[in-house]
Image (spheres, rainbow, N blue to C red):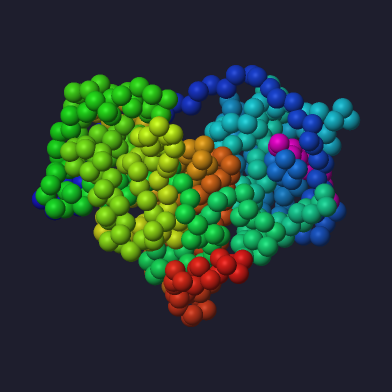
């Protein structure tokens, strides 16, 4: 059987993905002191107060959804809002029904209490969103505070913010200019980043694209390539039963374990692939590596040979199959981690999507039931909820790498042709930052794709590695 058809058949045989129940949030509260009564002017009209929380840092703004809804009533960007049973429902195209207190400044005490930052359930026009937000306690006139950037992207708002005021043009939509933002330090909080068109090879913008950095569990994209190569060559079958080796079982019992496994337990390749890519199971990657090549060491050797065969730079090096830190075997042990540049990862993803496009059948799953282990798991990539067209690919985090995210998104250009946009982000402070930055990069890529095709300019000319190096040396 063709390896692609085999994987498709095995995925269809999996149990239907089951929604995971969200844990109930306790009534614990946090006290905010970095508060701002931001003045919002819509279409040049008199400004209205929008209560704003600066979370941890100045200008990291979370705005009151009730104040925003009241301010936008009667405009082209109006939306209704209801909050009940910890669920926030936003309905666009409908005026807001006030509950009282909208537009009133924060109290003179200078403090305000909400529940802790969490993934409360937010529905936008029937679509579930996964954004961190604050929810005020109690039941009466409950409010939700959402990141201003996330809100602007989801509601397609054209906003300008400066000096304690905010201006909105309701007749325009959200746009972002990453090249201009770079001058203000947009990328400085990450190690490196890139967004481009995997279909054409065009790179739209990048930051330190040739810098070799730790990549954490995004490593597993190369592991998937090696496993699929072995299946295509007849070395293994995707229908194989896999006996869990001792090293995988041992890893599952450590702090880096994700799914508990017993040595000698029997699983199958498809369940392990889903666990590896959807939940980032390190022990599943180890079990697959041993099954494919007999040992993880032999598997890693093949990973490095594949990197050379694909023409990736010397900055790409693999020490293990899962992306965890490992110590060298000597007296003065040194911790090492798999490394790549954003440009090398972009090229790896281009190859992966061309050679084994069925990878997105796994990485686009929001939840999946693993029969072998009797568990239902949830995808670690929240962009699957927040940005239509996203089909994966992989998250990753270690202390040294920071929060990493490699994302693929299907998008149509102005002519209706389908392209696959890819963003690579290495080294964000946390998962919230990596998600927001990746979404901004992908939205910028979508703008560029449509603008170029609409203008008749065609695909942008890909930037080659030498040009990227020259650009990095001159500050890019």
Q: Please say whether residue 278 is visible from this viewpoint.
A: no
Query: Which part of the image, by quadrant, shows the C terminus?
Result: bottom right
Residue 98 against residue 45 in the figure, above or below: above
Q: Is residue 323 left or right of residue 92?
A: left
x, y percent for residue 325: 42, 37
Image: magenta residue range? 47-56
Q: Which residue is painted at 48% across and 38% down in the image?
A: 398
x, y percent for residue 316: 39, 54
Residue 52 is one of the magenta-drawn residues: yes
In front: 192, or 448? 192
Q: Which residue is painted at 12% across and 47% down in the image?
A: 235
Taking the view exactly as shown, the residue that stands out farthest to the top is 27
| Residue 272 image-quadrant placement | top left
| Total marks in image | 0
Q: Which residue is painted at 55% across and 69% down in the image?
A: 471
Residue 304 against residue 139 in the figure, above or below: below
């Amino acid at each position: 059987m063709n390896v692609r058809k085999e994987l498709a058949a095995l995925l269809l045989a999996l149990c239907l993905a089951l929604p995971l129940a969200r844990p109930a949030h306790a009534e614990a509260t946090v006290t905010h002191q970095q508060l701002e009564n931001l003045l919002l002017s819509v279409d040049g009209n008199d400004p209205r107060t929008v209560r704003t929380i600066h979370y941890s840092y100045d200008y990291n703004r979370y705005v009151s959804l009730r104040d925003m809804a009241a301010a936008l009533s009667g405009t082209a960007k109006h939306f209704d809002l209801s909050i009940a049973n910890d669920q926030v429902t936003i309905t666009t195209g409908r005026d807001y029904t006030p509950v009282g207190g909208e537009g009133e400044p924060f109290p003179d005490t200078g403090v305000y209490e909400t529940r802790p930052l969490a993934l409360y359930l937010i529905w936008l026009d029937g679509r579930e969103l996964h954004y961190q937000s604050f929810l005020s306690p109690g039941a009466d006139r409950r409010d939700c505070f959402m990141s201003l950037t996330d809100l602007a992207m989801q509601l397609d708002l054209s906003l300008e913010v400066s000096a304690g005021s905010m201006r909105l043009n309701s007749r325009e939509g959200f746009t972002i200019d990453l090249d201009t933002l770079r001058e203000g330090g947009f990328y400085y909080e990450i190690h490196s980043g890139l967004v481009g068109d995997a279909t054409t090879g065009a790179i739209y913008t990048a930051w330190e694209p040739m810098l070799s950095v730790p990549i954490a569990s995004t490593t597993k994209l190369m592991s998937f390539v090696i496993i699929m190569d072995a299946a295509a060559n007849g070395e293994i079958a995707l229908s194989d039963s896999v006996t869990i080796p001792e090293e995988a079982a041992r890893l599952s019992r450590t702090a880096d374990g994700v799914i508990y496994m017993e040595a000698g337990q029997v699983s199958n390749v498809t369940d392990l692939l889903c666990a590896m890519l959807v939940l980032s199971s390190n022990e599943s990657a180890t079990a697959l590596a041993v099954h494919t090549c007999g040992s993880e060491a032999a598997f890693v050797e093949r990973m490095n040979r594949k990197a050379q065969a694909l023409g990736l730079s010397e900055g790409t090096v693999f020490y293990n199959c899962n992306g965890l830190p490992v110590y060298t075997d000597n007296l003065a042990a040194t911790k090492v981690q798999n490394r790549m540049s954003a440009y090398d990862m972009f090229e790896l993803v281009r190859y992966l999507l061309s050679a084994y496009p069925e990878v997105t059948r796994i990485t686009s799953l929001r939840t999946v039931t693993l029969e072998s282990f009797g568990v239902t798991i949830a995808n670690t990539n929240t962009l699957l909820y927040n940005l239509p067209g996203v089909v994966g690919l992989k998250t990753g985090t270690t202390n040294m790498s920071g929060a990493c995210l490699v994302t693929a998104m299907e998008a149509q250009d102005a002519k209706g042709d389908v392209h696959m946009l890819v963003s690579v982000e290495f080294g964000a402070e946390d998962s919230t930052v990596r998600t927001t930055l990746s979404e901004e990069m992908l939205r910028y890529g979508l703008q560029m794709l449509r603008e170029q095709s609409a203008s008749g300019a065609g695909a942008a000319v890909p930037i080659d590695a030498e040009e990227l190096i020259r650009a990095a040396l001159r500050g890019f």
